[in-house]
Image: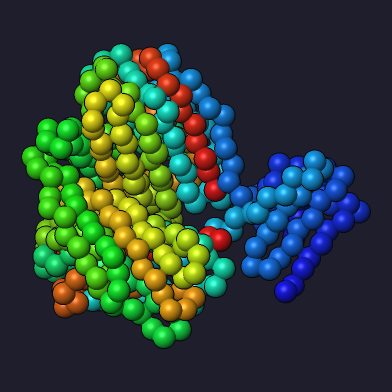
Amino acid sequence: MSILVLTSDTLIGTPATGNLEYNGQFYGTDSNASRAQMQRITQGTAVTCAGQTSIDFTGLPSWIKKISIIFNGVSTSGTSGILVQVGDSGGIENTGYVSGTSNIGNSAVGALVTSTAGFVAMSVTAAASTNSGVVTLFTVGSNIWVATGTMYYSGTATFAVAGNKTLSDVLDRVRVTTINGTDTFDTTPSAGSINILYEG
Amino acid sequence: MATTIDGSASVTINSGAVLGITSGTAVASTSGTSIDFTGIPSWVKRITVMFNGVSTSGTSKILVQLGSTTFTTTGYLGAANQTVNGSGVTGAVNSAGFFLDDTASASAIRYGNIVLTLITGNTWVESATIARSDTSAVSISSGSIALSGTLDRVRITTVGSPPTDTFDAGSINILYE
């Protein structure tokens, strides 16, 4: 464990006592001996996803406790829905998810659609739709990840997403793909992008 | 790199970026046609706007607008969709702002968060879940807006040019990180 301790002599400003430790996490202690963990938030590199059947974010640090997958105007070539999958050193896992989504439209509530192959962000898309939203993954410890989020489905509906997945090892990658694995992300009606924020 | 322990459990690094979550000052949403949070730092990547029992005087829907120097009032994509008692399903497509929910009722009392996340550049993606305590209703929403510059403000208002409905209950605050 690497530890960086700043004494009062090295501090800039107040309080009179304090420390900062680094072990994948930061902690601050103020003059009242109140100690709190500091959150790091890191932005990935946005990916323009046109022409791909899946987008991977790899090399994620082991200290992550929360990941937000952000979709902006994403379009696909067909009607297959969108999956978010996670993985570890053994690769992306495509089984063992407990996941469901439903939507509220303009005139009806959609049926619950479940998946064991990934967190089902949207159960269906349309070639002419542009989809935006955020799916956030939280760990509850022991490599168990819980998903929640909302996704806008062009003009007609918003999906609500939830689920969980237990990995066999520490999460180090996230994949966004389509449910059928063959529909591609495209540029019609818009060339969307996907990015992540991660923090711990 | 300058490192500051500022006494409030925040560590400041790299041009003022703060490790940790910063809370704004809660505003009583009991008067006025809009509530602004300004001076938001340029390094912010996520903003959570929290609604605690918020109500308005009329039937105009609540909008959340973002801005860079001035508020952006066009170009919002996405929608909010609401279901009341498992039926009564409606939706509203964004344009002049992010609809907080799809409620057009002076008796509505709203609880929940709208989360604004920076995807890249100056483009922000919105995600929200709002529930009402005056009836069994929930709204979910998502959308996006490409700002012309770095975000520095968030406004909560109602539809209208200018808006005329006033806030008459509750409180609103933001967290940014």
Determine the image quadrant of residue B55. top left
Q: Can residue A171 be seen in this view?
A: yes
- Residue A17 percent location from the top left of the image: 85, 48
- Residue A127 percent location from the top left of the image: 11, 63
Q: Can residue A50 be seen in this view?
A: no
Left or right for A126, reference B66: left
The quadrant of the rendering that contains the N terminus of chain B is: bottom right
Left or right for B87, reference B156: left
- Residue B107 percent location from the top left of the image: 27, 17
Left or right for B177, reference B50: right
Residue at horizontal 18 percent and vertical 32 percent from the top: B84
Residue at horizontal 76 percent and vertical 55 percent from the top: B3
Determine whether A127 is above or below A168 in the image: above
**In the displayed image of the protein, which residue is found farthest to the right?**
A9
Determine whether A171 is above or below B86 in the image: below
Depth check, front residue: B107 or B164: B107
